[in-house]
Image: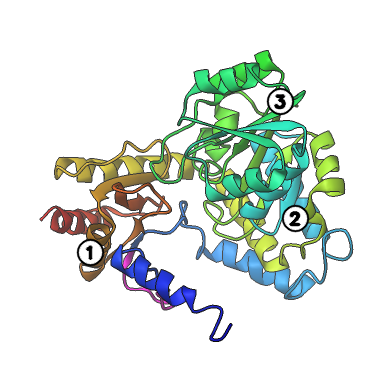
Amino acid sequence: MTGNPLDWLKTRAAERAAAGLRRRLRPRSARDPLLDLASNDYLGLARDPRVVAGAVDAVRAWGAGSTGSRLVTGSTELHAELERELAEHVGAAAGLVFSSGYLANLGAIAALTGPGALVVSDALNHASIVDACRLSRARVVVTPHRDVTAVEKALADRTEERALVVVDAVFSVDGDLAPLAELAGVCRRQGAALLVDEAHGLGVIGTGGRGAAHAAGLAGAPDVVVTATLSKALGSQGGAVLASQDVVDHLVDAARTFIFDTGLAPACAGAALAALRVLRAEPHLAERVRDRARELAGLAHALGLPVTRPEGAVASVLIGEPAAAVRAAERCAELGVRVGCFRPPSVPDGVSRLRLTARADLTDEDLALARRALAAVRG
């Protein structure tokens, strides 16, 4: 055979271009002039001076990198402090910090299941959960979105002794909540554990942003495992598993994405800890971002745009085809507003959309600008 064995990439790129699915990086400047309705900085803390100072102080104390895996040199007193305060915030017995929320899901789900176990996963779970299910080597049943009856049937029909139900607390595209109390009841009747991904719940849902599991009365339950990211409401980077001490001890021994990965950088740990302390001192921030999300959705609805009803910080405006969604996002940017543009494979065919993410620090002037951009999308 002759030629470049990777020439097939050109064909695949042309196919994506024809379908309106090519993606490109758009580096933003440090002083981005656009109103941000696209990021996950829900509480507006990524640039908060207190959070930035937490990162800077950590770098000065510990250096730029963690220097090794968590089991060698990558665990510092700062990591331990962050784990204790995260666990306390959500009502868990213990915590374990990973380098990202993605790795927290991969590590926890794979280590808590494996061959001879069953994983039951919601059809709209995040890609990190989907990949974790694939890597777990367990049998996986994907149930229709928020269908508690289907989850119970999957558990009741199983032949496996061990089972884990996995669900996003707040689904990242439409912004709707999982029925956690009902799922916990099903799990307990059927002898299964429940893992709740609080990526979009921590800092947003419940009193003081303690998360959807806490709001559902599941805080500290020994059969409930919470995963979370530090890169959204806490404005930093990293992930965590918050659970019983038995679960955390098991992950230290068995979670490959913990054992073999370099520990979270000190700057990220310091920033996340500072942001958590801001949230605990100013618990109204969680309610504020939910209010702003409802206002954004209300603006879209008043303009006649099909929009989801946000239960957290996220609302989606349905556009339809990928090319139309891209044009709508570009039009918003022309008018000074950056919005998310979700196309396949992030969403199914025919339901491409603009995703609007609220922040607790949005002003009335920001909302007025957002309304003008959405009015242009409506045409």
Mark 1 element type: helix
Mark drawn on residue 257? 2
Give the x, y percent position of residue 111: 77, 43
The prevailing secondary structure element of the residues shown in magenta is: loop
Give the residue displayed 64% in from the left and 21% down from the top. 155
Between 117 and 101, the residue placed more toward the observer is 117
Q: Quadrant of the C terminus?
A: bottom left
Label 1, label 3: how far apart the Cα atoms are? 46 Å
Query: Which comes sooner in the sequence, label 2 or label 1?
Result: 2
The crowding category of the residue bearing disc 2, from other C-alpha atoms within 10 Å (few below 14, some 14 to 19, many at least 20), is: many
Give the residue displayed 51% in from the left and 58% down from the top. 45
Spot the residue most to the top.
189
Mark drawn on residue 221? 3
Give the residue displayed 55% in from the left and 26% down from the top. 180
The stretch of residues the image draws in magenta is 26-35
Q: Is residue 34 magenta?
A: yes
Label 3, label 2: how far apart the Cα atoms are? 24 Å
The correct choice, above or below, for 181 with respect to 210 in the image is above
Give the x, y percent position of residue 253: 87, 47
Spot the residue most to the front.
1
Between 301 and 174, the residue placed more toward the observer is 174
